[in-house]
Amino acid sequence: MGAVIGPKGKTKRKLEELSGCVLNIDSGEGVVEISSPNENDALKSLQVINAARAIGRGFNPEKAYQLLEMDYYLEVVDIRDYVGRSKKRLGTVRGRLIGKEGKTRHIIEDMTGCDLAIQGHTVSIISDLDGLESAKVAVSMVLGGSEHGSVYKYLEGFRRRKR
């Protein structure tokens, strides 16, 4: 909850300012209540929820604010769906996804135009619809054990199709 509030409430204020919604945060319970001036605007509330989730998942607030736009989406992938409950396997697969000095993560981000946050047992993706699907496939390939070269070839194909 602290990340959503930000230093001296800065992140919360900016989220409210950009969305037009009011956030009531109960840090003790871990609950965020969102009220919109236009009660019929459920989409705006969902966008604010996604932005708050993204911040909680480790994204820089500036990147999470993109979710308040119509064309950006958040996807959270649970690594445990691929590796089970083994902490050792979880660490290994997270390392594969990040890559040496962040190489794999940066290649996925650069080729799909997405932003990735790898935290705990989840991988979170912020992107437009095209980039989101391709990033999700690439992440799934790595988590599923595909060789990095195969993933990079898939991403090259995506980039060629996108042009």
Image: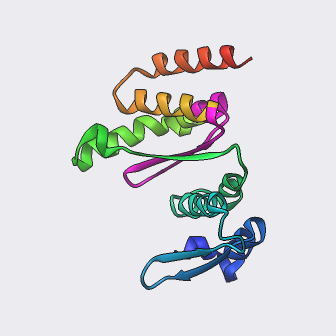
Q: Which residues are magenta?
A: 107-129
Q: Is residue 127 left or right of residue 53?
A: right
Q: In the depicted view, which residue is nearer to us: 67 or 138?
A: 67
User: Residue at position x 68%, y 53% from top?
Assistant: 63
Q: In the depicted view, which residue is nearer to us: 133 or 21?
A: 21
Q: Is residue 32 left or right of residue 128?
A: left
User: Residue at position x 71%, y 52% from top?
Assistant: 66
Q: Could you say where residue 53 lies in the image, as x and y percent from the top left?
A: 53, 61
Q: Could you say where residue 147 lies in the image, as x and y percent from the top left?
A: 40, 20
Q: Residue furthest right?
A: 17
Q: Is residue 78 left or right of residue 114?
A: left
User: Residue at position x 66%, y 19% from top?
Assistant: 159
Q: Could you say where residue 26 lies in the image, as x and y percent from the top left?
A: 50, 84
Q: Is residue 34 left or right of residue 75?
A: right
Quadrant assignment for the C terminus? top right
Q: Is residue 128 magenta?
A: yes
Q: Could you say where residue 117 lies in the image, as x and y percent from the top left?
A: 53, 49
Q: In the depicted view, which residue is nearer to us: 142 or 104?
A: 142
Judge whether 57 appears above or below 7 on screen. above
Instruction: Give the image quarter of residue 5.
Output: bottom right
Specify the color scheme: rainbow
Instruction: Give the image quarter of residue 115.
Output: top right
Count of number-bearing discs: 0
User: Residue at position x 44%, y 85% from top?
Assistant: 28
Judge whether 41 appears above or below 74 on screen. below
